[in-house]
Image (cartoon, coloured by chain):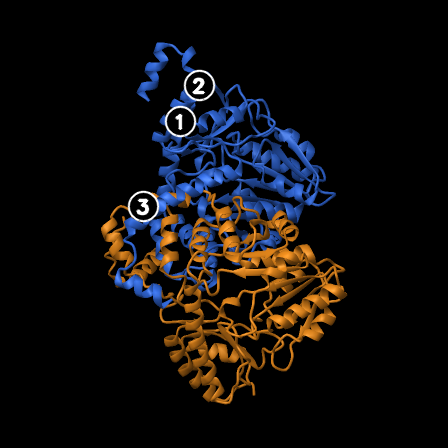
Chain colours: A blue, B orange
Amino acid sequence: MPVSRRGFLSGRVLPFSGALVASRGMEAGESGAMQDRAGRANVPPGIPEIRINSNENPLGPGKTVLEAIVGKFPEAGRYPFNSTPNDGALVSALSSKYRIKSENVVLGGGSQEILKSAVRAFTSPSRGLVTGAPTFENCVGTAKKLGHPITEVKVDSAFRLDLDSMIAASKGAGLIFFNNPNNPTATVHGARSVLDFVARVRQISPDTVILIDEAYHDYVTDSSYESALPLALDTPNLFVTRTFSKAYGLAGMRIGYAIGRAETLTPLEKLRTPYGLSVFGIAAAITALHDPKHIAAERARNTSVRAYTLQALMDLGCKTADSQANFVWVDVGKPAKEFRDACAKEGIIVGRDFPPFEKTHVRISIGTQDEMRKAVAVFRRVLRPVSTTTTGSRMEASWH
Amino acid sequence: MALTRRRFVQAAGLGAAGTIATDWIGARGREHALWSLVSPTLQASERDLIVLSSNENPVGPGLRVLNAMRTALGEGGRSAGRYSPSARDLVDAIARKQGVKPENVVLGCGSTQILRSATHLFTATDKPLVGTIPTYEECAGYAEMMGRPVRAVPLDASCKIDLDKLAEASQGAGLVFYCNPNNPTATYVGARATRDYFERVNRTSPTTTILVDEAYFDYVTDADHETHIPVAVDNPRVIVARTFSKAYGMAGLRLGYAIGHKDTIKKMADWDGGTGTGSLNVLAIHAAIAAIQQDASVIAAERARNQAVRDFTMNWFTTRGMKPADSQANFMFVQLGRPAKEFRDACRKRGVAVARDFPPFEKTHCRLSFGTLDEMKRAVSVFGDVLAKRSTAA
């Protein structure tokens, strides 16, 4: 457009910093409006907001990734298949990372697109979905829309997916959703349990497709855990999903993928929205794959802040499940909504309700160390109102 | 990464020396200097390749939109790591712009998602998809994949939609894909004739839904020209699809939308849409909010720019005895008297990419998108060379 172009080159355009300042106000206004409409708890005006409700990486992507995104700005008008690199290049980058063939990879607009396609492809009115309770709700939501049967298996007393009961429910099922680590409980199953689970499901219900969602893979520190990727490449009717939305810090860019045997993935490839990944998401993901040190650093950062957060919650008398992710699952001894609303009044946004534990448990994502210090101070006030605190704990509050 | 880095350097216009500091986020001054060097003209996927194959806007979305994208990355780029809560704000902005209510709007990951949803919801094994042949292939491709029947209706002699034949074929159809202007032929059916067609189908086949794809609406210069959005809002059997990929210059961002009756839109949103953490990326959402709030003169300027290039290119072919179909879009369909593949391969060797095959015209016709005037001047010189050689298939 000639007008903009002239503006661009003659410097009539706002200086970069100016644009940033001007828009920050606008964004704040937008997010305020959103909360009202989405029915989320309101943060009073003027109180800075700390978002620890969506299991995001609070630091976002690294510099090289941001450079890659901005470097693609001149190609905003090009379809992804006309851009370099294109989505095929992302498939290639993933293939070489995992030393697999491109036919073993399917991309998605976030792993949510793959989860949705899996339910559409593999369940039917006579072949239902088997899933945990609580677990990530995406598959259940899709199955409900389709009216396909759903079996939700409650987690065990340690808040781990109850694999024995899920196996028992799997006979004749279309799809099993196995979130490992499990969102929202943050617990993980080790490699041996996963292997045993897959073998037993294959034995009693070989046509059932198993989806192991490893969205939080990069945050696991438990040494008994291993990715099911190698298993997925060897086993029919099994695939693994991964995402760039968590440790990679690219939730806003919407990129996930599935890995498995080609014949397992074919229905997902067919249902995928053609050229659904943006030029920017593709470039960001490829660049991120070339920076494994960034992920290692993010895992270390998360492990440290997670330990701090778990300790602080235990000090407040809360029981927590073992966390192998970038969030924690906490018994706050009161309804999640009550806790959430009280925290929101002080600017701290925590996770939604997760039935059947919405009367007692809350999911809290791990922000930065600084954010968690501020959040813990608020949790302390919410869980131990000042009237009942001792002088000692007030002093403790001031240290944080 | 080497590749991406090179692209960044190239985009910034600094050559291959690689003198850019990596920490552009921190260094405002330097960053601004860099930023102001970015030309808004689109880069081709290969150096010097002229891309005339995908009906893109060759100048991109413009500075205001690019600035909105930069802002959407947030402080230190951290917003790239957040799920965007702003899709609903985009719905509101579109509703305001089009004079409808938010309940009349559903977003899609490109209009591709809209086309797929409509095909999924409104066709069935006994309710075929009806469309012209050729037309944009997405609906037919999806219908075939899902095992839904497809009825293809030939165009008339001037490569326009044959409304009588289409109305006849629409009887009992689940969905009619009505692409206007039609891709790949670029021809346009006037507003009155289109409304008459709707009425005829509504009357004779009341359960048939018509999906009007107005992807190229902003490029139409015909006097009998109006959007069918007002019809769609009131008529549950008419849906209008729009995209940010064409005149708005945002094909790389992936955003489209449908406007229709609230019940129809709800059906589409329930199946595949809504404003949650779906497939829409944060840059696309903020780019689209900025784009749709721009003054109407921005799109008018793009329409005028395209028209000048269209006149130049159509004239070049017409004066050489190859009269293209009347174009009301940012591309044209022309009979070259040789297979599209042969022409395409020869042009590609000379640095110009033209479009894919469009059966049943793949042996004779080619679709050419309009680049910038400068690109088209270079392209016609390539076309001249290629067409001067006798076709090997003739």
Q: Is residue A290 left or right of residue A37?
A: left
Residue A370 pos. (x, y %):
34, 30
Give the number of the mark in front: 1 or 3: 3
Structural distance between the alpha carbons of marks 3 and 2: 40 Å
Give the number of the mark in front: 1 or 2: 1
Q: Quick check: can you spot residue A249?
A: no
Taking the spot 53% from the left edge, 54% from the top edge, the residue there is B109
Q: Nearer the viewer, residue B322 or A109?
A: B322
N-terminal of the pair, mark 3 or mark 2, is 3
- Work out whether B102 lies above or below A79: above
Taking the spot 33% from the left edge, 52% from the top edge, the residue there is A67
Amino acid under disc 2: Met
N-terminal of the pair, mark 1 or mark 3, is 3
Residue B262: numbered disc? none
For label 3, the SS is: helix
- Work out whether A286 lies above or below A84: above
Q: Is residue B2 left or right of residue A32?
A: left
For label 1, the SS is: helix
How crowded pointer 2 is (Cα within 10 Å; few <14, some 14-19, many 20+) is rated as few
Q: Which quadrant, please, contains the N terminus of chain B?
A: bottom left
Residue B265 pos. (x, y %):
62, 52
Q: Which residue is mark 1?
A: A375
Amino acid under disc 3: Val
Badge 1 and badge 2 both on one subunit: yes
Host chain of mark 2: A
The image quarter in which residue B228 lies: bottom right
Q: Which quadrant, please, contains the C terminus of chain B?
A: bottom right
Label 3 with label 2: CB-CB less than 8 Å: no
Residue A314: numbered disc? 2
Host chain of mark 3: A
For label 2, the SS is: helix
Q: Which residue is mark 3?
A: A21
